[in-house]
Amino acid sequence: MKAFFHLLDRLAATSERWLNIGATGLIMFLMLSVVADVFYRNLLTRSIPGLYELNELTLVGIVFFAVAYTQSVKGNVRMELVIGQLKGKPRLAAEFLALLLSLAICIVLLSRSVVDARTTIVMGLFTEGTIAWPFWPSRVAVSIGFFFVCVRLAFQCIQYLRSITGNVEQPTS
C-alpha cells in the first residue's frame, strides 16, 4: 500500500510540474504579447484587437496551473501565529486539521468550478470585445487547477496522518 501511495504521489508531482511548466509558458506568452502590443501601439497608435481580453483569460491559467505545485513545495502564504508555537505531534495535528479544512474548501470549489466550466461549454459563452474569445478554456483551467490542488492536499493529509500515528518521520510534501 505504501508503494502504491508513493507511485500516486510521484504521478501527481509529475503532473504538477508539467502544469507549472504550462503556467511558465503562459507567462512567456503574456510577456511577449504585451511587448508586441506596446510596439503595435507605438507604431499604429492603437492596440492589437482582442489582445487585452485574451491576456485576461491567460492570467487564469497562469494562476491555477501553478497552485498545486506551489502547495507541494509549501510555498503558499500561511499564518504561523499559533501553529509556529507548537512542537511535535500537536503541531502535526494542527497542520493536519488545517490541511483537512483546506481540502474540504477546495473540494467545494472544485465541484462548483466543474459545474461552471460545463455550463460555459454548453452555453457557448464568449468575451465581449473586439474579438470574442471563448470562456471555456479559462474555466476548465480553474477546474484542472483545483483538481490537482485537491489531490496534493489529500496526499499531504495522508502524510500528516501517518506522521501523527507514528508510521512516518516527517511529511515531505
Image (cartoon, grey):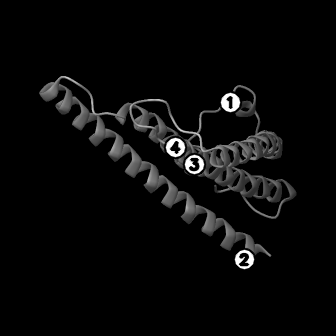
**Sooner in the amino-acid sequence: mark 2 or mark 1:** 2
Q: Check contact, mark 4 vs mark 2: CB within 8 A.
A: no
Crowd tier of the residue under label 1, counting other residues whose Cα lies within 10 Å: few below 14, some 14–19, many 20 or above:
few
Q: Which residue is mark 4?
A: 134
Q: Secondary structure at mark 1?
A: loop
**Sooner in the amino-acid sequence: mark 4 or mark 2:** 2
90, 40: nearer the viewer:
40
Which one is closest to the eye, mark 1 or mark 4?
Answer: 4
The structure residue drawn at horizontal position 52% and vertical position 47%, both measured from the top left corner, is 66
Q: Is residue 70 visible?
A: no
Image x and y of residue 67, in percent: 57, 45
**Sooner in the amino-acid sequence: mark 1 or mark 3:** 1
The residues tagged by marks 4 and 2 sit, at their Cα atoms, a distance apart of 42 Å
Q: Which residue is mark 1?
A: 80
Crowd tier of the residue under label 4, counting other residues whose Cα lies within 10 Å: few below 14, some 14–19, many 20 or above:
some
Q: Secondary structure at mark 2?
A: helix
Q: Is residue 77 visible?
A: yes
Q: Which mark is residue 2?
A: none
74, 81: nearer the viewer:
74
Question: Taking 140 as reference, is 129 above or below it?
Answer: above
Quadrant holding the N terminus: bottom right
